[in-house]
Amino acid sequence: MTHSNHRRGTRESLMGDWVVFAAPGTELLGEASKHKKFLEILTKYDPVNCTTNTGIEGESKRLRYVKGWTKQKDGGVHQSATLEEIKGLEKPRGGSALYNNKKAVESVVKELVEAELGFSIVISGIFDEVYDVCEKAGIKPHTVNFSGETLGKMSLLPEPKILEIITMCGHHFVAAKLAKHMIQKVQQGKMTAEDASIELAKQCTCNWFNADRAAKLIKEYVRS
Amino acid sequence: MPLPRMSFKEIKEKQVGFGSRGTSEMKTNDRTGRFKAGEVGIACELGRPGVGFCFRDLEKVSVALAKMGVEFEPENPASVLLDLKTGKIKDTCKEIRDERALSAIIECKAPMERTPEIYAKLQEVAKELDTVFSLDLINKCRDGRPPLKKILDDSNIYVRFNGKTNIGLGRPLIP
């Protein structure tokens, strides 16, 4: 899976978009205390999104925190969780968090290095900034995944500004037409950019859609 | 509308495939050593971003890659459908050629020096597709940096300034 590898945007915009996660399979490793420690670290630095699973494969449920997603906005399978609920789980398994600033990621990585959990940790972000985070934490990157040019029938793609929004869900559960529809509602004054971005974030069940960044992109789109 | 031939439960129980669209590729490379020094991991994510694809198009890409002599990832779900020598869809599942899906990933690897010629082949086959694909190029770091970057730069192969980095905290570590 490569669902955080192809996030698009300007350098300035992507400086507000960092994904930190324990690689798939981590949920099957080690005792619950390690997973609790992992989530304690992730939740400590004001993430804009945070996710974990309960129990083990086959019995698990995903808990999803997105900043700004309140219980009143829940609907159907899309149920929000608070950071307290995520931290308070007895047997959490694996997890991820999104941050909108480098400083938070520096703090998270430093703590993860000290905690020696043994989990494979991946950061999606601007490479030279991630390398700098690693250097400050006294570690060296192990393996990278470059996002190349999209190839094929390019006329099928939505406009670049919409792609910047929808590629934040690498599984493409956030449809281009839904993004345009939400933007239209914002343009008509029927919805705030923040509420529109939460609606889009709900569709990304891995919970890696950065609603904080999406709200900024929607505002830019409306202004342009 | 016909029912799916097999449920996800049956696929797992009968071990005819693997979960999800791909492997954990470089995300666990610090613990699995899937990609070794000097190799490039290549993933072609058919139908992404957000377009969808037909398996006939996936086959065009896998045949092109097979002709380049790449090593396909055996644990990838798309590999189950393919003859890994020719890249063609196996006769036993030929009816899938005209089916559509939101995405599927072809995963393979090769010596990293061959990246430019493989990339050229992908550009060539991309002209025949009725969809798009996202491209991943994976490389194990040497002293904290990916040596593949120089090859990409020297060959004018564009990659974004952002992507994924495995920061090497997995244990036991495969250095």
Image (spheres, coloured by chain):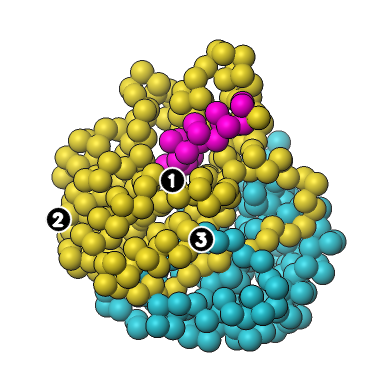
Is the residue at mark 1 from the same chain as the one at mark 3? Answer: no
Residue type (three-letter) at the residue carrying disc 2: Ser
Q: SS of the residue at dot 3?
A: strand
Quarter of the rendering occupied by the C terminus of chain A: top right
User: Could you give the CA–CA distance between mark 1 and mark 3, rounded to whole angstroms?
Assistant: 14 Å
Q: SS of the residue at dot 2?
A: helix
The reply, left or right, for residue B45 in relation to residue B37 is: right
| Main secondary structure found in the magenta portion | helix
**Subunit of label 1:** A
Eyeballing the image, is B54 above or below A144? above
**Subunit of label 2:** A
The reply, left or right, for residue A122 in relation to residue B97 is: left
Magenta span: A203-223
Q: Are marks 1 and 3 in contact (CB under 8 Å)?
A: no
Q: SS of the residue at dot 1?
A: loop
Q: Say which quarter of the image contains residue A105.
A: bottom left
